Image (cartoon, rainbow, N blue to C red):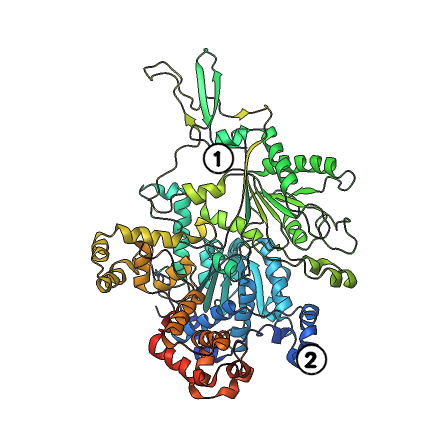
């Protein structure tokens, strides 16, 4: 019970099993006391890096970091680790990180692994993944980050020597096969188990592997659980979205997050606003055929049966390449992709791309069409290897995913000398290369199939959000120095089935789920009485469309900093719930803000299904500061148009200061404004000023002693006094 996730037992545990549980003796105090700086990984990669001359010379520092491939934690990653330290000190042994694709879950995991091994809270760490390509990817990262202090192995490659390693990486399927985890491992072999993409890697039977080992547990996921609601149909276990919803909620409970709040969260919107991720440039392209498939009526096909009766069948988007086949439509997809896809900024060739197809057969068709078109566009450049099928039935498909990420699929491109990029430009896949696949130089994604799962949509579009410097792949130092940084600033998301529109406008985030209607609709074909023949098992069944098809509608849109609706939906749900609460509406109408605030806290916060909290809603709204419950209510009921950020609030307060204090030193207003902001924003500056330790500001990066001296002497004291008397610091803490 103390360690969380208790299970029912059907027999008395053996002395060995009891002893295993007592063998887990964490030292939470030592774990919490370990200092984790932003250079926590870099200190393992190159101990004493800060004493080297190239590091000390600021002009040479970037080249020094690149040469030694040093990795530094970002502040939000550091905060995630601190949350584990804080929660562990309170007795927690299970943690869950909800971090968007591209925000560095593996680097964060490496730092956590070092933390636990270094403090003696783990003698060995197990890193679980659910796909073979992620196994290689993770092991490569651990070696790059931690090889000087710790050893990492892939279990299947070191079946006899894994005990000599500090970190063991494996797929959960490998341990499940023939009950291997029970036969070859003791429950005490791993003191920390990290589950990558936890909602997948510990689902179903895989849970047994995860729970078998005694010790700390950390789950990682890029998929928020807040998209899916309880179904209204009791049989909805057959609904894929309900299965997904239950799987996500079960994941949160497994990690002791019954409230629905993970140990740490960093969303796609957070990443975009922090400058670490990129939102897509969406190209919504629809052909004549897909426009009909996506319409309410569907693509109507009329035929006659053997008795001469007229039959009608409507095919929908979900029938494409399953029951409805159209090569001209596939050709229109490929033509649009090649005409409008982003190019590699250095070589000028077509940018690296992943296309998502309906099925293995569909993927093969798309590959053939792309290679034919590439041969026409670039004669002699490719040998049927411009596009490659990367699906589970293809030999060495797992290795192909690794080679594509390493710019070696099909060999190296010859477009630009001394520039390393893959010869193959497009990988066409179905279910691979989605969850956790890391290929930062991707420039195009193509959705050649409809998507109905919000978590699948989040994962797929997440493949392109990572930033990249293409100059890193240039081997010629002179050329690299000449071109400087060549940054990836955008990626194109080609949407041929209106998936973005579906999740932005049509997907019902709020209503209870009902079972979907059959994808092929039987329609009446008889007389006016409505008792005529309908298409059924004996209907058309499948249909192949041969008429020419081309794109008839193409709309392009750069997604802004607020992200897509799927990325910001939680706050809208809260606003709707607040407005639907009649008691709250009455209190707001009477402007009884104190009672309204109390009502929200007591009746809307921390309730089943949604588990609204101030912090959760702040992040969903994309606000960079604390917000109050009253502000939430005012925003929900339209009293304020939005939440001001820190900079806007500080500017408001400074204007009030000027109006009230009327300083005469007009030529020093800018310096006073800088001091005013630094005192509010930076707790370290505030503490040093209040204590009179002005000399300590010399080593402060945001506000120095020199900055303080620029402020008129009288105001160095009066500004802090004014802020203490008239400005609430709570929003800025």
Q: Is residue 675 left or right of residue 114?
A: left
Please determine whether, in this image, residue 464 is positioned above or below residue 389: below
Residue 580 is left or right of residue 125, and the answer is left
Quadrant of the rendering where the C terminus is positioned: bottom left
How many numbered dots are placed on residues in this image?
2
**Residue 292 in sight:** yes
Q: Is residue 451 visible?
A: no
Quarter residue 643 falls in: bottom left
Q: Nearer the viewer, residue 292 or 540?
A: 292
User: In the displayed structure, would residue 72 be above or below residue 383?
Assistant: below
Labels 2 and 1: the sequence-earlier one: 2
Q: Give me the residue at 52% from left, 74% from top.
A: 115
Quarter holding the N terminus?
A: bottom left
Using residue 92 as the reference point, say whether residue 58 is left or right of it.
right
Q: Residue under circle 2?
A: 52
As helix, strand or loop, the secondary structure at mark 1 comes to: helix
């Amino acid at each position: 019970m103390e360690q969380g996730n208790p299970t029912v037992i059907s027999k008395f545990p053996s002395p060995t099993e009891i002893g295993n549980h007592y063998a887990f003796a964490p030292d939470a105090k030592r774990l919490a006391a370990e200092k984790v700086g932003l250079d926590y990984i870099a200190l393992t990669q190159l101990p004493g890096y800060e004493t080297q001359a190239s590091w000390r010379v600021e002009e040479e520092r970037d080249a020094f970091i690149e040469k030694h491939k040093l990795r530094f934690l970002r502040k939000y990653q550091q905060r995630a680790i601190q949350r584990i330290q804080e929660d562990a000190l309170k007795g927690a042994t299970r943690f869950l990180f909800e971090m968007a694709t591209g925000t560095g879950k593996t680097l964060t995991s490496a730092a956590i692994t070092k933390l636990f091994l270094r403090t003696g809270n783990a003698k060995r760490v197990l890193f679980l993944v659910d796909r073979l390509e992620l196994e290689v990817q993770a092991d490569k990262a651990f070696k790059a980050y931690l090889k000087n202090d710790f050893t990492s192995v892939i279990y299947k490659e070191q079946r006899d020597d894994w005990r000599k390693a500090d970190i063991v990486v494996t797929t959960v399927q490998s341990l499940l096969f023939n009950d291997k985890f029970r036969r070859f491992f003791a429950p005490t072999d791993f003191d920390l188990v990290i589950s990558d993409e936890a909602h997948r890697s510990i689902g179903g039977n895989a849970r047994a592997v995860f729970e078998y080992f005694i010790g700390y547990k950390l789950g990682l996921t890029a998929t928020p659980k807040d998209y899916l609601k309880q179904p209204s149909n009791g049989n909805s276990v057959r609904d894929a979205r309900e299965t997904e919803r239950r799987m996500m909620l079960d994941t949160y409970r497994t990690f002791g997050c019954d409230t629905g709040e993970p140990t740490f969260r960093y969303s796609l919107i957070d990443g975009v606003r922090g400058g670490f991720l990129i939102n897509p440039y969406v190209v919504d392209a629809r052909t004549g055929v897909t426009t009909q498939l996506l319409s309410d009526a569907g693509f109507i096909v009329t035929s006659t049966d053997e008795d001469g009766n007229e039959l009608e069948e409507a095919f929908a988007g979900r029938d494409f390449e399953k029951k409805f086949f159209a090569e001209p439509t596939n050709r229109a997809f490929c033509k649009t992709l090649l005409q409008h896809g982003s190019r590699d900024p250095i070589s000028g060739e077509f940018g690296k791309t992943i296309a998502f197809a309906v099925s293995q057969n569909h993927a093969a068709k798309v590959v053939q069409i792309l290679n034919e078109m590439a041969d026409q566009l670039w004669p002699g450049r490719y040998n049927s290897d411009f596009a490659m099928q990367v699906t589970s039935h293809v030999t060495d498909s797992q290795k192909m995913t690794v080679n594509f990420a390493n710019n070696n699929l099909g060999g190296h491109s010859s477009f630009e000398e001394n520039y390393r990029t893959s010869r193959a430009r497009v990988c066409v896949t179905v279910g691979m290369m989605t969850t956790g696949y890391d290929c930062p130089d991707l420039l195009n994604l193509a959705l050649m199939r409809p998507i109905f799962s919000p978590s699948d949509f989040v994962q797929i579009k997440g493949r392109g959000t990572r930033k990249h410097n293409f100059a890193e792949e240039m081997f010629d130092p002179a050329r690299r120095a000449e071109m400087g940084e060549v940054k990836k600033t955008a990626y194109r998301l080609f949407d041929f089935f209106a998936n973005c529109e579906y999740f932005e406008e049509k997907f019902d985030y709020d209503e209870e789920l009902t079972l979907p209607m059959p994808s092929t609709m039987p329609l009446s074909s008889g007389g006016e009485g409505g008792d005529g023949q309908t298409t059924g098992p004996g209907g058309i069944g499948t249909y192949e469309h041969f008429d020419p098809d081309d794109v008839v509608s193409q709309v392009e849109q750069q997604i802004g900093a607020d992200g897509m609706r799927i990325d910001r939906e939680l706050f809208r749900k809260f606003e709707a719930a607040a407005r639907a609460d009649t008691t709250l509406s009455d209190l707001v109408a009477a402007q009884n803000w104190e009672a309204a605030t109390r009502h929200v806290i007591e009746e809307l916060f921390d309730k089943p299904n949604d588990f609204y909290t101030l912090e959760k809603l702040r992040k969903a709204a994309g606000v960079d500061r604390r917000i109050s419950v009253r502000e939430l209510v005012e925003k929900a009921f339209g009293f304020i148009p939005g939440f001001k950020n820190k900079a806007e609030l500080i500017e408001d307060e400074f204007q009030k200061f000027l109006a009230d204090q009327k300083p005469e030193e007009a030529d020093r207003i800018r310096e006073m404004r800088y001091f005013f902001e630094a005192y509010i924003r930076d707790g370290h500056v505030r503490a040093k000023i209040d204590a009179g330790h002005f000399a300590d500001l010399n080593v402060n990066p945001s506000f120095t002693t020199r900055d303080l001296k620029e402020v008129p002497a009288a105001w160095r004291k009066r500004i802090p006094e004014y802020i203490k008397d008239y400005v609430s610091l709570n929003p800025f803490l």
